[in-house]
């Protein structure tokens, strides 16, 4: 898949949550191209080419759906790298996580997250949450050029 075609970067290590998110998007006719990163290293490699690179390697995605509890490099570090980069910081990042710990919420907003959503346990609530994310961030939100 060409990196210019990707509109959603889903950073999720849980296969069930990954499947639920993709099903939820399709169920609500959100057919944007999705790239999956299963840990923080994969996410940073996708965006920057390598973990240590300071150069943004891709155009887009339109939105990043980011879990916090990731192997190798956690979601907060990924968020920090994205929001501290002069070009990448324009990409909306939505934390979509099971964590409701106040320290995670506070730190996410301190680092510049655009939205923090706790994953609902119920499938219908989860699909509705993903639908609302898609509607707002992919259809309604206007990004800076």
Image: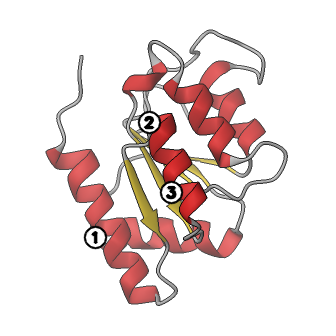
Colour scheme shown: secondary structure
Position of residue 81 in the picture relative to residue 110 (left or right)? right
Residue for point 19% across, 41% down: 141
**Front one among 87 and 110:** 110
Numbered badge on residue 105: 3
Nearest to N terminus: mark 1 or mark 3: 1
Residue for point 55% across, 46% down: 107
Against 5, is 52 above or below?
above
**Residue 27 falls in image quadrant:** bottom left
Quadrant location of the N terminus in the rendered image: top right
Residue for point 72% across, 42% down: 40
The image position of residue 2, as x and y in percent, is: 53, 28
The image position of residue 85, as x and y in percent, is: 53, 17
The image position of residue 137, as x and y in percent, is: 27, 47
Q: Helix, strand, or loop for circle 3? A: helix
**Front one among 114 and 38:** 114
**Front one among 55 and 59:** 55
**CA separation in Å, label 2 and label 1:** 28 Å
Q: Helix, strand, or loop for circle 2? A: loop
Q: Is residue 30 visible?
A: yes
Q: Helix, strand, or loop for circle 1? A: loop
Nearest to N terminus: mark 2 or mark 1: 1
The image position of residue 54, as x and y in percent, is: 66, 10
* Location of mark 2 (residue): 112
Q: Residues within 10 Å of mark 3 (few under 14, many from 20)?
A: some
* Location of mark 1 (residue): 28
Residue for point 64% across, 37% down: 78
Q: Residues within 10 Å of mark 1 (few under 14, many from 20)?
A: some
Q: Which one is in front in this view, the residue at disc 2 or the one at disc 1? A: 2
Q: Is residue 34 visible?
A: no
């Amino acid at each position: 898949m060409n990196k210019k075609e990707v509109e959603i970067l889903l950073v999720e290590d849980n296969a069930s949550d990954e499947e639920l998110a993709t099903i939820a998007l399709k169920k609500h006719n959100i057919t944007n191209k999705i790239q999956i990163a299963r840990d923080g290293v994969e996410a940073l490699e996708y965006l920057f080419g390598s973990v240590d690179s300071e150069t943004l390697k891709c155009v887009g995605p339109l939105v990043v759906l980011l879990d916090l509890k990731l192997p190798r490099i956690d979601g907060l570090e990924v968020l920090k790298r994205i929001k501290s980069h002069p070009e990448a910081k324009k990409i909306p990042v939505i934390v979509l996580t099971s964590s409701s710990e106040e320290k995670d919420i506070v730190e996410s907003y301190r680092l510049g997250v655009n939205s923090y959503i706790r994953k609902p346990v119920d499938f219908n609530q989860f699909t509705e949450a993903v639908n609302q994310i898609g509607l707002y961030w992919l259809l309604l939100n206007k990004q800076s050029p």
